[in-house]
């Protein structure tokens, strides 16, 4: 019997760390199944940095959950963001911090969701609730996920609970939050080796709202203009995906982790929605989004409401 634990497609740091941390928790629960942390895409450089720092093996790369007897979802619940055959799987548990969307099961399950900035914040609580010891290594993984999702506590998605948990985990991991956190975030901003297609797929999600389809991709950097040097190639890939998927809007958001501002390449027949929502002007397909860093809180809800 096998249990696959998976985060969302185009996995970010929280998705990968949550799979690893949840797998360890399941093993501590005494699961009789073979518990396998999995991923639905390639690692980004930030995640690679963390796994190397804590000497942890990456989750197994899969493109289907057909080999699992049951599946546990972390850091997502929407079937649109999951494995292509997830609707056919037996989902036994979900631990998540996103809105519930496009989700349905045929059997009862364990479901834990909280309005916090990071799934690993919830997993910390699950460890404590079940009196499972947290080793320095797993504390480091959870801390890294919180730092990543909160942009070192600068994101509007960050809550006081995230901060409190991060501080507790830093003590267990014996890590200085600020120095380690900045090094970790900077490690994820080297985008020089990525093609336009790879850039768009580092962290990308699709959404449906009001009969329209839109996609939002996001990368973090310390130099937005260096990413925009590849603007023409990025636009070509975006336009191909718009045609292929029938998208009404595609936003490629480039976020400066130091200034907490973003610029977005905006394409599609609903591009004007971005101008209306953010009271900005799209100039040569680029919109400036001051203070916007969170897709979950500052982009998706606003676009969903107005598209």
Image (tube, rainbow, N blue to C red):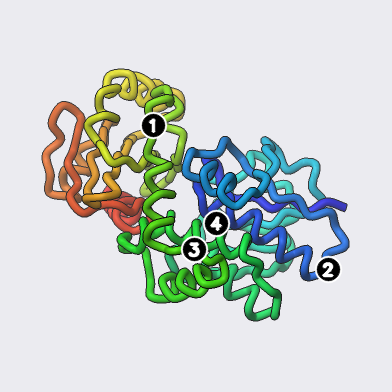
The residue under label 4 is: 75
In the picture shown, does residue 279 fall above or below 99? above
Decide which of 287, 245 is in the foreground and name it. 287
Alpha carbon distance from label 2 to label 3: 29 Å
The residue under label 3 is: 175
x and y percent of residue 136 in the render?
Answer: 62, 65
Element assignment for label 3: loop
In the picture shown, does residue 246 fall above or below 204? above
x and y percent of residue 48 in the render?
Answer: 54, 41
Task: Name the N-terminal-most of marks 2 and 4.
Answer: 2
Q: Nearer the viewer, mark 1 or mark 4?
A: 1
Task: Name the N-terminal-most of marks 3 and 1.
Answer: 3
Circles 2, 1 touching at the beta carbon (< 8 Å): no
Q: Nearer the viewer, mark 3 or mark 1?
A: 3
Task: Name the N-terminal-most of marks 2 and 3.
Answer: 2
Task: Name the N-terminal-most of marks 4 and 3.
Answer: 4
Element assignment for label 4: loop
Element assignment for label 1: loop
The residue under label 1 is: 191
Alpha carbon distance from label 2 to label 4: 23 Å
Decide which of 37, 301 is in the foreground and name it. 37
Alpha carbon distance from label 3 to label 1: 26 Å
x and y percent of residue 221 in the render?
Answer: 32, 40
In the picture shown, does residue 53 fall above or below 144? above
Residue found at x 55% / y 51%: 15
The residue under label 2 is: 30
Circles 2, 3 touching at the beta carbon (< 8 Å): no
Circles 3, 1 touching at the beta carbon (< 8 Å): no
Residue found at x 64% / y 54%: 19
Decide which of 123, 205 is in the foreground and name it. 123
């Amino acid at each position: 019997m096998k249990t696959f634990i998976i985060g969302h497609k185009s996995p970010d740091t929280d998705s990968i760390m949550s799979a690893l941390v949840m797998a360890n928790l399941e093993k501590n629960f005494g699961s009789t199944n073979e518990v396998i942390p999995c991923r639905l895409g390639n690692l980004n450089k930030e995640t690679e940095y963390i796994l190397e720092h804590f000497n942890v093996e990456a989750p197994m790369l899969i493109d289907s959950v057909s080999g699992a007897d049951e599946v546990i979802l972390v850091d997502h619940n929407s079937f649109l963001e999951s494995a292509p055959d997830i609707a056919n799987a037996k989902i036994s548990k979900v631990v998540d911090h996103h809105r519930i969307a496009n989700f349905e099961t045929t059997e009862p399950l364990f479901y834990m969701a909280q309005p916090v900035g990071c799934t690993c914040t919830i997993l910390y609580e699950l460890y404590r609730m079940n009196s499972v010891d947290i080793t320095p290594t797993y504390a480091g993984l959870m801390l890294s996920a919180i730092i990543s999702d909160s942009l070192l506590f600068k994101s509007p998605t960050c809550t006081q609970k995230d901060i409190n948990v991060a501080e507790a985990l830093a003590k267990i991991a014996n890590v200085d939050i600020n120095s380690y956190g900045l090094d970790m975030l900077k490690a994820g901003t080297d985008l020089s080796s990525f093609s336009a297609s790879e850039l768009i797929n580092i962290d990308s999600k699709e959404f449906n709202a009001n009969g329209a389809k839109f996609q939002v991709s996001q990368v973090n950097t310390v130099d937005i203009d260096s990413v925009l040097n590849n603007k023409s190639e990025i636009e070509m890939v975006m336009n191909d995906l718009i045609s292929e998927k029938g998208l009404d809007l595609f936003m490629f958001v480039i976020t400066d982790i130091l200034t907490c501002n973003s610029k977005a390449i905006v394409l599609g027949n609903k591009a004007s929605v971005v101008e209306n929502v953010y009271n900005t002007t799209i100039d040569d397909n680029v919109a400036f989004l001051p203070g916007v860093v969170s897709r979950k809180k500052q982009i998706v809800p606003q676009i969903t409401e107005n598209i």
